[in-house]
Amino acid sequence: MNLAFKDRIALHYLLATAALVAVAYLVVFGVVRDRVYTDLDRNLRLEATKHLGELRVAGPVIRFANREEWEEREHREVQVDPVFIQLSDPQGRLLDRSPNLKADQLAFDAAPGWRAPHNSMLRGKALRQIQVPVEQDGRRMGYLLAAISSEAARHVLDSLGLVLLGSYPVVLLALFGLARGLAGRSIAPIIAITAATNRITRHDLSARVALPPRPDELHTLASAINGLLHRIEQAVAREKQFTADASHELRTPLAALRGTLEVLVRKPRRPEEYVASIGLGIQEIDRLSHLVDQLLLLARFENHGQDLHHQELSVLSSVHDVLHRHRETLSAKCLRVEVPAADALPLRSDPYLLDLILDNLLANAIKYSPAGSTITVALGAADGRLCCAIQDEGIGIRPEDLDRIFDPLYRSDALSHKEISGTGLGLSIVAKACQLLGIELSVASELGRGSTFTLRFPA
């Protein structure tokens, strides 16, 4: 059954309320019925007690002591609620009865349960009847049967039942309409949120959902949607910026290669000129190939978490391996690398990703350090976790760029240092690899004084 959301809310509310109303109606009917029959039974017991005192026992025979007065009183008075009295022997045979019974008899039953007040019928009319044993000297002489009319009580209970049954569907229909209206008002903010989100497209992510005035669950939902839209907008903006930067970075070596080839074909040249131009072209091709490799590596990191191969590693040995690969650059710039001795905690990690992280960080430290400066690689433990800090004395990073240096293809103040080559992908790769390995990466830098990148490995 395809119902609108507000109709489903109203239906669920109606089902729950219907059960509660039914219980309430049953309780009301039960209380009224119990009250009515309690009053009838009290009057019935009073009459039975009064007439027990009017009995006369002569041997095995029980008679009314004042029957003549009783008959005269019946002729003089009109009883609204007549009382019927009957005497029966222990076997239920009629011994005597009140004049108003005429030729009729009250129903008799020797079962013990009939001694309690119960309903019966006489001449098609409802009665409330009680059966009281008559005893003398511990011997049962018979029974006194007393009954009073319960027609009025039955009429009251029947009328109450009809009113309750008739009002039940009316109440339910009214409750359904009320619940549907309230549900419609309750979900109005959700409809507004849906309409606002439908207006948001990939080309326009600036729109936001209006926040409800009250700080309730809908306010929280709208705030969460706005937060999600903000994150999506930032991601799309980064994607657009990444695409633009990648296009620019790919275009630069292609333009240089094209220019070199165009110069070669303009006129005949000497062999050494061809060799020099071809060498420049090969350098641009290598640069382009390196950029493409890094872009592919960055893309593969999205699914690399399934292919991690953890094993026991020595961070100190990995640092020395990376420094050995960069020994020529270190020697050419006369850079000094200090690796203070320290007791390193054991580590399980992926060797390829760890080498990639250390290689990029140390390559950056070497690239941005002035000749003759010192690079420090400090290993230690803090709070049971292995820490590795790589500190250089290079150009540093501007404070406003610290939050962006891990974005793909972003280079801090690149125009001021055109002589330093780079793609702006190294730190992005480092950040992704650290995320995969659970390594906490932080950076501290002072412009003109150097930078420190700290790795905190998981325990």
Image (cartoon, rainbow, N blue to C red):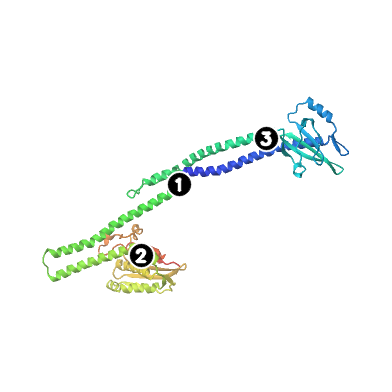
User: Against 274, is 401 above or below?
Assistant: above
Dot 2, crowdedness within 10 Å: few (<14), some or many (≥20)? many
Report the front residue among 231 and 42: 42
Residue at the far top in the pictured view: 76
Q: Secondary structure at mark 2?
A: helix
Residue 154 badge: 3
Dot 1, crowdedness within 10 Å: few (<14), some or many (≥20)? some
Q: Residue at x 20, y 67 (%)?
A: 280
Dots 1, 3 in contact, CB < 8 A:
no
Q: Secondary structure at mark 1?
A: helix
Residue 196 seen by the camera: yes
- Per the model, the C-alpha gap separating discs 2 and 1 is 38 Å
Residue 430 badge: 2
- Per the model, the C-alpha gap separating discs 1 and 3 is 57 Å
Q: Please state the horizontal and vertical placement of residue 153, each as a whole percent of the image.
A: 68, 34
Q: Callout 1, which amino acid?
A: His
Q: Callout 3, which amino acid?
A: Arg
Report the front residue among 56 and 454: 56
Q: Of discs 1 and 3, which sits in the foreground?
A: 3
Q: Which residue is label 1 attached to?
A: 219
Q: Residue at x 35, y 74 (%)?
A: 320
Q: Secondary structure at mark 3?
A: helix
Dot 3, crowdedness within 10 Å: few (<14), some or many (≥20)? some
Q: Callout 2, which amino acid?
A: Val
- Per the model, the C-alpha gap separating discs 3 and 2 is 89 Å
Residue 129 badge: none
Q: Please state the horizontal and vertical placement of residue 425, each as a whole percent of the image.
A: 31, 63
